[in-house]
Image (spheres, rainbow, N blue to C red):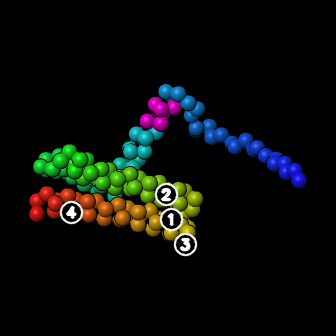
Amino acid sequence: MRFTITTITMEQPVSEFKSKSGLKRIFTAFLYSLDGFRAAWRNEHAFRQEVGLFVAGAVIALLLKVSAFEKLVLIGVLVLILIVELINSSIEAVVDRVSLERHPLSKNAKDFGSAAVLLTCLLAVATWGVVLYNRFI
């Protein structure tokens, strides 16, 4: 018995916004990232609050008499909050772009993003608590 496998290839449409390769791609990706930071700062109140938390927390972490690794972890969990907040904001923007109507799936998408931010904040609180407890108590 002989089997043959036929493959079907379909070309994917390529976005005009997608850059090709090389240093130009890296540079334009960097510029898009800066645009993302600017838009988040301008439009997302939670992001601005979390940047404030990050700055204060980073300064405190750097001043604490803990190991360099512990400083990295303390600052890293604060960066993680910013990362998850940016992802949450992008989910909310896409949901709003699709439709501003109330819909259970839209609510779920936004609530899932919010829950991810909450879990990240709880992780940060737990991390800071463990490091500070082990060092000072």
Circle 1 packing at 10 Å, graded few (<14), some (14-19), many (20+), is some
Instruction: Report the side of 57 relative to 20 (left or right).
Output: left
Instruction: Report the side of 137 relative to 52 (left or right).
Output: left
Asked if residue 36 is among those painted magenta in the image, a careful observer would answer: no
Q: Residue at x 20, y 58 (%)?
A: 131
Q: Residue at x 21, y 62 (%)?
A: 130
Estimate the x, y position of residue 74 in percent, counting from the top left: 24, 52
Circle 4 packing at 10 Å, graded few (<14), some (14-19), many (20+), is few
Residue denoted by label 2: 91
Numbered disc 1: secondary structure: helix
Numbered disc 3: secondary structure: helix
Amino acid type, callout 3: Pro
Q: Give whichever of 4, 97 is nearer the camera.
A: 4
How far apart marks 1 and 3 lie (CA) works out to 9 Å
Q: Which residues are magenta?
A: 25-31
Residue denoted by label 1: 109
Amino acid type, callout 4: Gly
Numbered disc 4: secondary structure: helix
Residue denoted by label 3: 104
Q: Earlier in the sequence, mark 2 or mark 4?
A: 2
Residue denoted by label 4: 129
Label 1 close to label 2 by CB (< 8 Å): yes
Q: Quadrant of the C terminus?
A: bottom left
Q: Residue at x 58, y 32 (%)?
A: 20
Closer to the eye: label 4 or 1: 4
Q: Give whichever of 69, 121 is nearer the camera.
A: 69
How far apart marks 2 and 4 lie (CA) works out to 30 Å
Q: Earlier in the sequence, mark 4 or mark 3?
A: 3
Circle 3 packing at 10 Å, graded few (<14), some (14-19), many (20+), is few
Asked if residue 27 is among those painted magenta in the image, a careful observer would answer: yes
